[in-house]
Structure formats: structure tokens, C-alpha cells
Amino acid sequence: MTLTKCSVTTDVIGSIGTTVQERGMTTQEFKDAFDQMPEGIKTYLNDTLTVEIDKRSLNAKTDNYTVVADDLNETITMTGTKTVTLPLITTTGFGAGFRCRISNVGTGTVTVAATSTDTIAGAASVSLAPKKSIEVVADAAGVWAVLGFDFTELISTHTGKAVSRNTGGTRDISVAGTQTIALPFRAKNIRINVEINGTQKASWGSCDADLNQSCMMMLPPGNISGSGSSAILLNDGAGNQVTGTITAIDDTSITITWAKTGSPTGTAVLFINATTH
Amino acid sequence: MNIVAINQSTNKVFESQSYQETDEKEAITAAITADAESSGIEVEISEMTDEEFQAAISG
């Protein structure tokens, strides 16, 4: 996108002539005319230029796209398994120093391809996995350099402070279905202790961010068993059993899917410790 | 404090969750309400102290 040029008249004094009086102007009229130039520049810097920079928006594409000169310093967002073509660096409007960002905001794979003998990161093209972004910069030798941003790697390797939340809840285990536990963050590890209220029939389990989960169940007086596929396993000792599987983790909650065998009754009392970092 | 959903058919606690901050109430209430709807159960949502809640699930 090209910014609007400043169109202020800069020859005010020259237009007026040798003296104000020769132009038949009053002193005030001269001051007003003279002030037009700085006022115009001020308006351009404070209003026109600022607004045009602020309003630079994403260039959203859902089909194959060829980068144009107006994409200079812009961000092109791509949705779908599509190709973004970079024209020859020698194309008018491009040249050394041209740069733009390309972001794959969809779920497909985006191919960023150079043209003809130009290369990008030493190859004819590069692939962008979902949620990945790159910035390409042209040099004078037909090479597009890539400045990459791997947000997945950034997230997986960061060393931020750990945060935890303890919360409690209950569930009528006679009813199968889903239970949503609200949390103030996306949990990476969940530890969950459940007891059928008023009994010692209990379960201790855990689940990670990839929904790998398991648990150990205690059925008094001394029976212990477990599950490698659910975070909760409860048995009433009469052949009735209930499992609680964590089936979703998002930024605001976890979802427990309750399933039953037989006709379990009672209230499951849950104590949940969720952590992230 | 606890957000508690009472099953209108059985008058027993269907589901509940405790909360620490007042601004968590809305999200918990919405989650429990959605759980009840997905299970086809009509519930009445209320807030209870820990003592009130213990009495409700023990009753």
C-alpha cells in the first residue's frame, strides 16, 4: 500500500512577492498565508500519515495469490491449501529490500514459491504449516531471504512461570454425558481425585495436554485397579461402573465425558488441580 | 462458594463447581447449564455456601 504524499504548498513566501504591501496584503493576511505551510505539514504528520499507518490491514486471501507491489510491508493471510507466488525480484515495484509477511491462518499447507530462477531460502519454494508465518525479504541477486516465526516452537520452549488452580465440583454419576469444568487458562497438566460421596470408592488420575490419561481406582476394602484411557474410574462394588474421560482442553475449560456400565448411583465429588506454564 | 445445579425431576444435585473469584460465576453457570441441556435434564441453578452444599449432596 502506498502512503499518501504530503501535498503542502511550500512556496508561500515566493508567491507573495518582495513585500506584503506589493501584493496588497495586510500583515494579518500575510501571517495567515505563511502559516498555511506549517499547519499543512502538522496536519499531514498528525492526521493523514498516522491514520494511514494505523489502518494498514491484513490482506486476507482464500485462493492462490501473487504478491503485488502494494504488499510492501504488508501481511498476507492465507486460508486453505494454496500458493503464494513471489514475482521476479526485478519486477517493477519490487527490487532489493522489498519485504512482506505471509501467515498461514488456516488448516491447510501454504506454499510460498519464487518465480523462474529466483529462490526462496535457497529453494524454489517453502511450505508453511498451519499457524506458521514468515517474512520474506528480497536482495539484489534474485534471492528471497526468509525470516521465520515458529510460534509452536516458541510456545513449547518458553519458560514462563507456572500457574495452578484448584477447583472442586460434583456430578451425578447416574447420568452419562459431558461435564465442563471452567478454568482461567488452558491446562497442560490435570490431576483429578474423585470419590463417590460418603464412600471410600475413589479414583486418582491425571491427564496431559495431549489428552493422555490414566487413573488408579480403589474399591474398599482393598481392591485396586485402574485405567489407561480415562482419568476417572469408579466402581460401586455391585458391577456398576463409571468412567470419566477428559475429552477436550481449551483456553477456558476442560470437558469430562462420563460413561457408565450398569446403573451406578451417587454423587462423584471431584477435586481438580490444573497447571500450566 | 458453589454454583449448583439441582435436577428438577429428582431434586438432587446434578452438577456443581466451586469458584474463587466472583467473575468466574458467569462462565461456570454457563458451563453447567450447557451440561444439563446436553443431557436433557432440567435444572435450577443456585449459589450455595460450602455448608449448604454439603447438606445438599448429603441429603
Image (cartoon, helix red, strand yellow):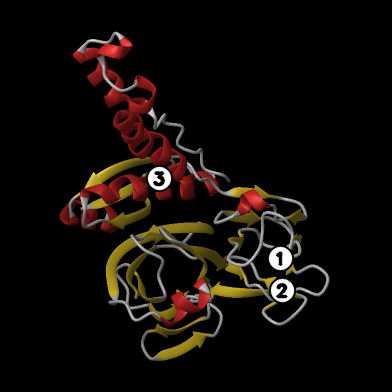
- Mark 1 to mark 3: distance in Å? 54 Å
Identify the residue position indicated by label 2 in the image.
A142
Residue B30, numbered label = 3
Q: SS at mark 3?
A: helix
| Residue A111 seen | yes
**Residue positioned 31% across, 77% down in the render:** A160
What's under tag 2, amino acid-wise? Answer: Gly
Q: Position of residue A215 (x, y in %)?
A: 46, 83
The amino acid type, in three-letter code, at marker 1 is Ile
- Tell me the element at label 1: loop
Res. A17 image quadrant: top left
Judging by the rendered image, the residue that carries numbered circle 1 is: A89
Q: Amino acid at mark 3?
A: Ala
Residue at 36% across, 26% down: A12
Q: Position of residue A16 (x, y in %)?
A: 34, 20
Residue drawn at 40 percent across, 70 percent down: A187
Q: Position of residue A55 (x, y in %)?
A: 47, 41
How far across and how far down the image is residue A201, in percent? 37, 77
